[in-house]
Image (tube, rainbow, N blue to C red):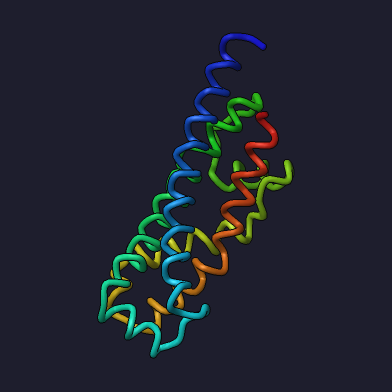
């Protein structure tokens, strides 16, 4: 393995480490919420979460999901493809299609996760039903993000 490959591998590993830290925070937030609430949450559970200290766990879950999705799309995928010897100077959809061919992710699911992240970024707090849907979707899909990370980790180990 050449020096350049070692540099790329180290970058992938650093990005993975950062992603796993955010995933751990995401999982910890939901573990705390699961102590009091059954998922998917409903309107009553949401009202209880928002009226007490549990709002911090809800906010943590949303924040960690957003950071994780951002870092994966902005850093991890490109560093992984560089390590694999792929060209990263192309449209993001081409990058996703390459990752799908490698068995890393499903492009359609990535767009669901990206759309969810975009919804969070656009003042989601104004609509209770939207927030409930966001929290429940993050809860349902956090394993998808973990599987993507595990797939990449397996290919660089």
The number of numbered badges drawn on the structure is: 0
Q: Residue at x 58, y 27 (%)?
A: 82
Q: Observer-nearest residue: 138 or 25?
A: 25
**Above or below 60: residue 155:** above
- Quarter of the image holding residue 12? top right
Q: Residue 152 falls in which quadrant of the image?
A: top right
Q: 141 or 130: which is nearer to us? A: 141
Up-down relation of residue 35 to residue 89 (above or below): below
The quarter of the picture where the N terminus appears is: top right
Residue at the front extreme, as displayed: 35
**Which residue is located at x 67 percent, y 29 percent?**
157
The image shows residue 145 at horizontal and vertical percentages of: 57, 54
Q: Is residue 70 left or right of residue 50?
A: right
Q: Is residue 111 left or right of residue 128?
A: right
Residue visible at 35% across and 65% down? 57
Q: Is residue 84 left or right of residue 139?
A: right
Q: Give coordinates of residue 2: x percent, y percent.
A: 63, 9
Indicate the position of residue 45 as horizontal and vertical percent values: 40, 85
In the image, residue 138 sits, relative to residue 77, either above or below, namely below
Q: Position of residue 81 (x, y in %)?
A: 61, 32
* Residue sitting at x 45%, y 79%: 37
Q: Relative to 58, is 4 on the left or the right?
A: right
Please identify the residue farthest to the top as the structure is shown: 3
For residue 95, above or below residue 24: above
């Amino acid at each position: 393995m050449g020096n350049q490959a070692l540099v790329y591998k180290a970058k992938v590993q650093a990005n993975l480490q950062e992603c796993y830290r955010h995933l751990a925070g995401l999982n910890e937030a939901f573990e705390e919420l699961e102590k009091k609430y059954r998922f998917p949450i409903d309107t009553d559970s949401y009202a209880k979460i928002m009226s007490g200290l549990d709002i911090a766990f809800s906010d943590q879950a949303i924040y960690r999901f957003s950071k994780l999705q951002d870092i994966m799309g902005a850093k991890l995928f490109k560093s992984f493809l560089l390590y694999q010897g792929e060209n990263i100077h192309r449209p993001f959809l081409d990058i996703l299609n390459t990752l799908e061919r490698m068995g890393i992710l499903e492009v359609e699911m990535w767009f669901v996760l990206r759309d969810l992240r975009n919804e969070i970024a656009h003042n989601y707090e104004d609509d209770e039903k939207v927030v409930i849907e966001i929290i429940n979707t993050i809860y349902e899909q956090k394993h998808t993000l973990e599987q993507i990370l595990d797939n990449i980790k397996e290919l660089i180990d």
